[in-house]
Each structure stands twice: as structure tokens, then as C-alpha cells.
Amino acid sequence: MGNLIEKAIKKQPSSVLPQSSEQEKSLEQLRQEQNLDLENSDIITEETDIYEFSSFGIKIDTKYPQKMAVIVIENDEFDQESIIINCYHGALKLSEQLTTESFKAPNISYAKIAEDMTKIGRMYGIIRGFSKKHPQAKQLRGWLLKLQGKLENQLSYLVINDRTNFEIPWELVELKQNQHIGANLVTVRWQDITDPDNLDEVDSLIDLKIEEHNCCGNIVAYLNTKDLPKVREEKKTIEPFNPIVHENIYNFLDFLDTVDLDVSLVFIASHGFLGNNISETMLGEENEKQQISLPDLYAYDFDCLANCSSLVFMNSCHSGRLQTDESFNIFDSDERVGFSTFFLEKGANGVIGTLCQVADLYAAKVAKNFFDECQQNPQLPVATILKNMRCKAIENYLSEKNRDNQRLFLFTFLYIYYGNPMTKLKLIAKEGN
């Protein structure tokens, strides 16, 4: 038993899971505390799988509120084509947490199924089949439903830390018929992001903060109306809030890098191009001179994101997708990075991005729905706004099952939220509106 615990104490894979509050304790102290916890719980045997320890950190405590659960999806270290799902909630005993058996990762990402966006409708049936028939998907559904029952439906938030490259659309998985995870619970994505400012523990990770933040200030926008006619509709959508608009990406970046104003929202409506590596994945225009890659973004400080509470909304294809660094080898080999992690690292409280290519028509509709919801429910966090948008998209589709409603439903689920689940956006209308 001692060897298992020591391995588990040394291996703390995620900043999103409960950790000991006393970071300076010795290994021996931590091992003694873990032994005491195990003796008291009376649920651990010599045969206990190491994943139960390695996935949940040193101490299973109450770092997060009771209304929040965490799932971590990671590769099987012995088979990189297989994954394991770990589910955690602070009110449960260790024996009640879920660690699935290793299983071959399903090929059900948006990008795999809808390489041609005209085929996005296939997602609905395929994800329903996965939800209902796949053994580990059924385990995940059963665990969440039992937890909701145990908490008397007080479970509200789900943090998803997906460390794999398979891009499974967890928000779209059904808990029950027509009750999808991302519309039943407020879902928040989080990644293991290396803390660039911690020079003592160079592998330390940025923590996911769970506290209320109000984003109140100016909207700074980059709008590619040159290539994308529907972006003009997005411009009309944000005009009532007196945005500072740029239509040249480098003017936008330079302004954002030097602005001495409170910025509540950075809004980007542009092309997004997914390349074979992080240096080829771009935001901007079809004109290559008006494109920016993730490595190039590191030339900017964007202090405004850390100096005030800010949200970033990238209404661009592939903007929420993550990749490993196989071009420069400057990031940790296991770290999955992208525009979302960059803005979180720079201090943004929350980031919205997309998991695939988005048709312009539906991108404009999603943007309008987002701003309408924020106006109508300013007291709600942004992650909750997205949940409500998904609920309405499903309701509209179920009330009238036509192609347009189905597409809007599926595209709405393409948008995922990274960051603090308590972040709110306060939109300030200019005088006269």
C-alpha cells in the first residue's frame, strides 16, 4: 500500500482537482495524512487501481462547492489510442468516485464526423448512439444521474478537463433522452496550463478559480467583414454597446496591447484556420498577411486582460481547439495549447471558442442569441448563458424538427467555455439605446 500512495502523492496531474492547501508539506507528512484518510474511509484495498489516486490528487476534500463535479479524461499511459474517464465530487467517498476501464477512444469529434459542414446533421444520431450504447458513456451518464439524485438535483456545474486529442463533444452527450450534458449542467472546460510566472516549480499549473467576477467595461472587437458578409450582422448586434471596432487584425492587436481602459469583452469574428501544428493554426482573413498564429501572439502582453475582469469570445472556426506543440518544442510535450489557453494564461476570466468549422449564417445567429441572453439575464454567469442557449436551441428543434433548427442546435453546442464558471458580463448600452 505504501508504494501506491507514494506514487500517487508524487503524481499530481491537474490543477483542476482538489489539492492540499499546504503546498510545503514533506512527502512523508503527505503520505501519513493519506494513510490516515485511507484508514478512516475503510474502502481501499491493496488491489486498488492507481488511477483512483493519481486522478484525484493528494487529498479528496471540499475545495469546490457541493454543486460542482469534475471529470478528467486522460490517455491510457500504456495505449495512447485509449482513454480513461475519471469523475469526482467532494461529497462522495473514494469508492463512489468513478474511474472507468481503459477503452479505445471513439472517433466522434465534430471534425471527424463533419469534415464537410453539410454533414453536420450526422452528429445528432452518432452522439445519441454513443450516449445510449457505449459502456463507458453509460457509466458516465449513470454516475452523473446518481449524483444528481444524491444531491437532490443541486448539482449545477460540471468542470471538464479533457487532456486527450480526441476532441469528444462531451457537452452533446445525452444524460437522458433529449437531455444533453451541456444543457442539463453548466459545463466549463479547463486545461492544464503551465504557470509562466512560477520559476521555482517550473511544472506548476495555473489554478481554475471559482469566484464571482463581473466583466464591466469596453468591448474591443476585431471583425472580418471583408471575407465574411454575415459578420456585418454581428457588427450590428454589438453596435448598441458602443464597441471599439477594428477591421485590421494587427491594428486590433496593437490597440489591445496598449489600451489603458477597462476591457470587459474581446470579441473576434473572423476566419479560423486549423493547421497541422500550432504555427499553422491562424485567426484572421483569407489574406495570409492578415493572419496571426498562436506563437506570434506571444509577442503581445495584453495587460488589460489581467488588469480587469475580461471575457474573450472568438466567433471563429476552430478557435476553441487545442493542439500539442510539434513545431517548436517549446511547450511541454503533453500540454495542449491554443488560442483559448493563451488568453486564459494572459489573465482572461473566461474564453468562448468553437470546436470545428462554423457556417457564417449560424455563427451570426449564435452571436445574436448570446448578446440577447446577456442583456436579458445580466445576473447570470456567461457559462450559464451558454447553457440556456443550448436549452433553447434543443427546444426549438424538438418543437419543429426542420433542417435549420437542427443545424442551429448542433452549431450552438459547438461553442464551449473555458474558465471561471462564475464570470459575468455586464453589457453597457450607449446612451439613446
Image (cartoon, rainbow, N blue to C red):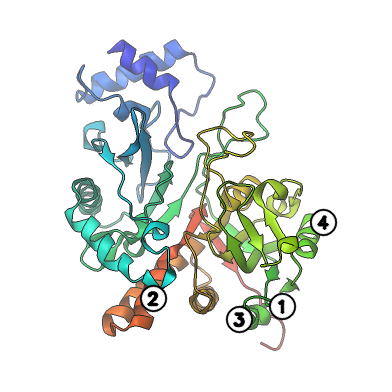
Mark 2, Cα crowd under 10 Å, few <14 / some 14-19 / many 20+, is many
Is there a contact, CB below 8 Å, between mark 4 and mark 2?
no
Q: Which residue is mark 1?
A: 242
Quadrant of image for the C terminus: bottom right
Q: Amino acid at mark 2?
A: Arg
Between the C-alphas of marks 4 and 2, the distance is: 39 Å
What element does badge 2 sit on? helix
Return the disc, 4 or 1, that comes first in the chain's sequence: 1
What element does badge 1 sit on? loop
Q: Is residue 248 visible?
A: yes
Q: Is residue 69 left or right of residue 306?
A: left
Mark 3, Cα crowd under 10 Å, few <14 / some 14-19 / many 20+, is some
Q: Is residue 189 left or right of residue 375?
A: left
Q: Which residue is mark 3?
A: 237
Is there a contact, CB below 8 Å, between mark 3 and mark 2?
no
Q: Nearer the viewer, residue 131 or 40?
A: 131
Between the C-alphas of marks 3 and 2, the distance is: 21 Å
Mark 4, Cα crowd under 10 Å, few <14 / some 14-19 / many 20+, is few
Q: Nearer the viewer, mark 4 or mark 1?
A: 4
Q: Which residue is mark 2?
A: 407
Q: Check residue 258 in the rendering and tell me which mark sits there, or answer none.
A: 4
Which picture quadrant has residue 332?
top right
Which picture quadrant has residue 235?
bottom right
